[in-house]
Image: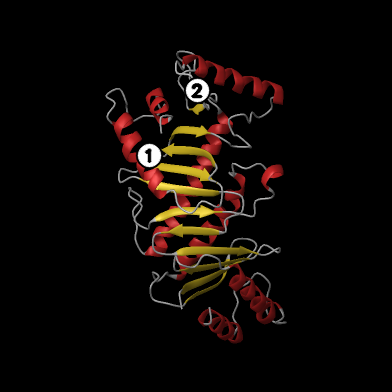
Amino acid sequence: MTIIYNIYIFDRHCECIFYTEWASQNSPLTARSGQSADAATAQTTARGASSDAQDRRSLDQPRPTVWPSSANSTHGSLQRNLPMEEHAKLVYGVAFSTRNIVNKLAGKDGPQGGNPGGFMSFATNTYRMHYYESPTGVKFILNTDPGTTSMQQVLEMIYRNIYVEYVTKNPLFNPNPAKSTPIENDYFRA
Amino acid sequence: MAIHSVFIINKAGGLIYNRDYSTNIAKLSSNEALILAGTFHGIHALASRISPVSRSEGGKDTGIQTIDTANFRIHCYQTATGIKFIAVTDPSYMQLSDVLARMYGLYSDYALKNPFHNLEMPVRSELFDTKLQQLIQSS
């Protein structure tokens, strides 16, 4: 049985444009430095409740929180979730460095895009991280249980059918971050 | 004969042994090999930090064990003393921890028991090279 913990999407400019978790046990979304645990859980339930309120379809489980989200920010200032940003940077760094090692060993280079060395995934004893890079440099990272061998097809489908369809072809989408809600809506149909 | 190359990284992340066994893998200059070893040491440490599984639930995360790519697979075996044994092989090799454990045995026999060997320094031992070659060819 495949357990999917969370997913990250990074764009060409190394920014995290999308993050959702389904079963993550130490969630970086709830990690707040210097705040009590009660305040942190209250914050996530409040965030979850606001996104639920926007959802008009009835789902069995509440929709998982998405980050970054423009729904929570007050107009003007963007609420910065610093531990989440740092966590995303760590994840990006690990994936990017591993990809470079693989490219170097394969004898090919190319930080521009397209993953010439063919880095697919790495595994530790508790989880496995899958990686897919589009030719344009958009990076999809998926964490699952270590038993799953390959999610390459899944990630490619996510890119081709969801990201390209609903994000790139969205005329309101600008290449700068803040992943919009359309990808959220259509994601949960799959 | 599908093990392409072997790296041994010490506790601090420095490369102490590096050997290619086939021509399929790109030839790395010594500088590049050092950089690669250092980078691997870093991501190995970070991988347990970004784990989505909490410590109490899944048990302690030991760090990266395999890296899968289209053309080869990288296996890593970390000992209790912090030494990492890395092998680059064909993608068909699923589990290499027993070979890497035997490699650790060879290392402790021919490097650690050598009274002239400085700890954490590059391994320069002909016997170690020969025995390792035999181990690689037999697996």
Q: Which of marks 2 and 1 is nearer the N terminus?
A: 2
Identify the residue at image location x=64%, y=55%. Answer: B62
Q: Front-most of B85 and B136?
A: B136
Report x, y in % for residue A164.
Answer: 30, 35
Identify the residue at image location x=49%, y=68%. Answer: B93
Q: Output the chain of dot 2.
A: A
Report x, y in % for residue B83.
Answer: 64, 65
Q: Front-most of A158 and B66?
A: A158
Type of the residue with mark 1? Ile
| Residue behind mark 2 | A59
Q: Quadrant of residue B110?
A: bottom right
Mark 1 element type = helix
Q: State whether residue A36 appears in this view.
A: no
Q: Is residue A57 above or below residue B78?
A: above
Cα–Cα gap, marks 2 and 1? 21 Å
| Residue behind mark 1 | A158
Q: In this view, does A135 lie above or below B102?
A: above
Q: Output the chain of dot 1.
A: A
Disc 2 residue crowd, few under 14, some 14–19, many 20+, Cα 10 Å: few
Identify the residue at image location x=56%, y=30%. Answer: A82
